[in-house]
């Protein structure tokens, strides 16, 4: 029995003898099946194929964890280090002994929280290894491909995690699309860990929002208004999207508000 991992999205499935026929996450219009068709691997297979994790200090008390060569969507996780335990934000597929040792050096993990299904990765393997809960919004329950007792489905608009972290449901990309507000980030000016519920674009003075990124399906105005208004009360100087280097380094709160307005104007009147 193997816990098969989808090569395209990186999600790990519940144990079975043979790979599933398809990946529901990739069959959905927000994702895609790769040009070579549905493909599968395992944690052992990834290690045999030379995949390994790298670690980068994004800022004090924030560690980026990503996989090389690039696997699946290529996102990196973020380890938020706090006096009351560390939170792993978003997840990746590869978990090995070297990664566990690196995380343990920084105090381990007390909880995992994930923005949306494209970043579920091997979340249950991580949760079992560190014996911690996984916080997912209940609106995305159907996309959990490896059900487990470590998964906690939260409801409503916010969920507090100690000591002062807040999970905020913004919706948009997925109904349960979530961001993490870290008020102690950037020396107390605040940081927003956004996955790609809010994504940083090439011009890092701006961000954007999409229903499907690979298939270029935009969000309607009502969702952009919801995102803009929901995040407005939270102060943050910096915004971290889902990949190394995708960061709005300063004035991120203004960048989100400005970008939402630009998006809404583009829906009403083409940019010229």
Image: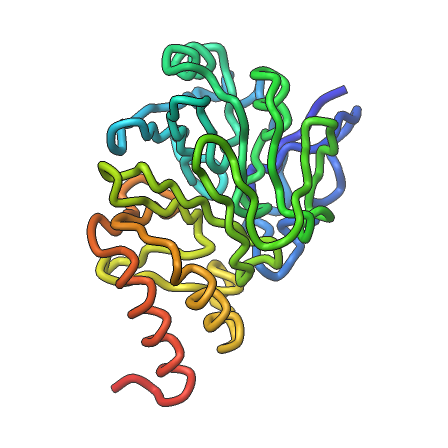
Q: What's the image's color scheme?
A: rainbow
Q: Which image quarter holds the N terminus?
A: top right
Left or right side of 49 for 128: right
Left or right side of 113 for 56: left
Q: Which image quarter holds the C terminus?
A: bottom left
Residue closest to the eye, 93 or 79: 79
Residue closest to the eye, 165 or 206: 165
Residue closest to the eye, 105 or 10: 105
Task: Tell me what residue is drawn at x 43 percent, y 36 percent.
Answer: 164
Q: For residue 122, what is the image quadrant?
A: top right
The image shows residue 54 at horizontal and vertical percentages of 34, 24
Would you say residue 81 is visible in this rendering?
yes
Q: Residue furthest right?
A: 17
Q: Residue furthest bottom?
A: 269
In the picture shown, does residue 113 fall above or below 17?
A: below
Q: How many marks?
A: 0
Task: Tell me what residue is drawn at x 33 percent, y 67 percent.
Answer: 257
């Amino acid at each position: 029995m193997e816990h098969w991992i989808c090569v395209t999205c990186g999600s790990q499935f519940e144990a079975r003898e043979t790979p599933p026929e398809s990946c529901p996450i990739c069959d959905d219009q927000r994702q895609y099946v790769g040009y070579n068709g549905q493909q599968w691997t395992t944690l052992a297979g990834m290690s045999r194929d030379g995949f390994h994790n790298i670690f980068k200090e994004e800022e004090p008390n924030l560690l980026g964890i990503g996989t090389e060569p690039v696997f699946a969507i290529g996102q990196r996780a973020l380890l938020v280090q706090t006096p009351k335990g560390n939170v792993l934000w978003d997840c990746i597929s590869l978990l090995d002994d070297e990664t566990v040792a690196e995380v343990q050096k920084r105090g381990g993990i007390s909880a995992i929280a994930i923005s949306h299904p494209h970043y579920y990765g091997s979340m249950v393997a991580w949760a079992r290894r560190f014996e911690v809960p996984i916080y997912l919004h209940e609106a995305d329950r159907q996309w959990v491909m490896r059900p487990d007792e470590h998964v906690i489905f939260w409801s409503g608009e916010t969920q507090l995690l100690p000591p002062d972290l807040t999970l905020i449901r913004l919706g948009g990309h997925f109904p349960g699309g979530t961001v993490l507000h870290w008020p102690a980030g950037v020396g107390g000016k605040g940081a927003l860990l956004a996955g790609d519920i809010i994504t940083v674009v090439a011009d890092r003075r701006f961000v954007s929002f999409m229903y499907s990124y690979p298939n270029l399906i935009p969000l309607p105005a009502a969702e952009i208004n919801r995102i803009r208004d929901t995040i407005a009360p939270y102060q943050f100087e910096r915004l971290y999207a889902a990949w190394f280097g995708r960061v709005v380094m300063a004035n991120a709160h203004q960048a989100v508000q400005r970008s939402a307005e630009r998006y809404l104007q583009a829906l009403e009147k083409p940019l010229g």
